Amino acid sequence: MKKILWLLIECLIAVVLIGGSVWYFMYAKSDSGQKGGRRNAVPVVITKSISRQTVPVNIESLGNTVANESIVLTATTQEIVRAINFSEGQFVKKGQTLVCLESELEKVALEQAKLAQQEAELDLKEAGLAQEEAELKLNEAKLKLNEAELDMKEAEREKERLERLYMDNAISEKDFDAQSTQFDRAKIQMESAKAQMATTKNNVESAINNVEKANTKLQTAKAQVASAETELADRIVTAPYDGIIGKRQISLGALVSPGTPIATLDDITKIKVDFNVPEKHLADLSRGQKFYAKSVAYPGKKFEGTIQLIDTHLNSTTRSVEVRGILNNVKDEQGDWMLQPGMLLYLTIELGSAEQIVVPEKAVQSLGEIHYIYVYNPETKKVARREVTTGNRASGNVILISGANAGEIYVDEGISKLANGVTVQLAGE
């Protein structure tokens, strides 16, 4: 029984060995031959000659749009919302009232301050009239004093003349005494005029003080009116410029505080766009220079803008300068603005045209930041991998700034099968 079992096992082993040998010679060996054949096959490629072409010289970049003006409207005081005078998405004009907060007490305070100002104005007017009247009386006192002084001097001269005549016994004592009395009377009148003059001067000074006090009172009243107007204005939120209201963030009856967001306000009649330009093009940029922008939202639509700002500092990492341009926004058929903040625009600054070495983009391979092409040598029938510096791309082509020369032959198709130094066969040979 054991002999029969061992015989069966030996037969099974023999069958397995024979089957494995047959499979190896029929399949594995043939596969090995095929693989070897593939390794030894020569890649077939299509080549073209490198040539110079006259192409547009452009600066191309990507930019993000921002509104010409954009703020978040906020409250400036803590109060309850009593009225909301705008709708989301509404266009509002500069100075338009948007939100009214509780302001009854401030209105009353403003009316009282205005009444106090009117009263102060009347007091100042009365004080001014009193000053004018006092100055008129002062002028009259001056005239009377001048007349009294003249009369006294005249009486004094006449007295001196009669005194000489009296001493010469040319006139009587009675006549001399009469003139002396006249002189004394003139002197008394002059002293009286001086006293009146001093009194009117004091009255004028007092009137001037009253005017100054009334003016101070008026200025205080005006300051109180201005303060009341400010308090009232703080409870009215207005649009600082023309723009479109965004999402509303308050409700009627809400208690707001300084800094509480109310809504956004954007002026998008003009759109700013920020983009970066490589350092090598810095000398080609200038303020006021035109550029064109495209958006995936509007295929085929071209927007024209001008450069508004070229930053004074370059980015030391990217070796590029930040540029800000501005575009005049346009409306669509529905009357809505086409360009919106936050859009991505494809920007082109046209510099002119020049002769450049151009190859199809598919002929340029990339390894990280390194770009290269395969150059074909007709004598050795081998290709060499050549590092190149690329420029602008347009219409499926790329400009080669360095690394290739006109007249050289490059591989246009069949690149995926190539490596540096590989022998190739040209298609059609």
Image (cartoon, helix red, strand yellow):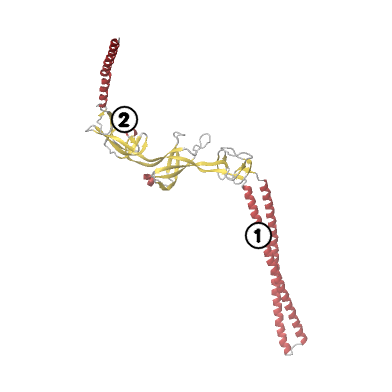
**Where is residue 55, by image quadrant?**
top left
- Could you tell me residue 44's position as x and y percent? 27, 28
Q: Amino acid at mark 2?
A: Ser
Quarter of the figure with residue 32: top left
Q: How many marks?
A: 2
Q: Quadrant of residue 307?
A: top left
Q: Which mark is residue 216?
A: 1
Nearer the viewer's eye, disc 2 or disc 1? 2
Q: Is residue 135 visible?
A: no
Kind of residue indicated by mark 1:
Thr
Residue in the foreground of this view, choosing between 425 and 68: 425
Q: Nearer the viewer, residue 239 or 126?
A: 239
**Quadrant of image for the C terminus:** top left
Closer to the camera in the image, 239 or 316: 316
- Helix, strand or loop at label 2? It is helix
Relative placement, left or right, of 303 versus 88 is left
Compared to 422, does 22 lie above or below? above
> Going by the image, does 237 lie left or right of 179?
left
Quadrant of the image containing the N terminus: top left
| Residue on which disc 2 sits | 416
Residue drawn at x 67%, y 64% as measured from the top left = 209
What is the CA distance from the residue labelled 2 to the residue labelled 1?
93 Å
Where residue 201 appears, as percent x and y from the top left, is 69, 69
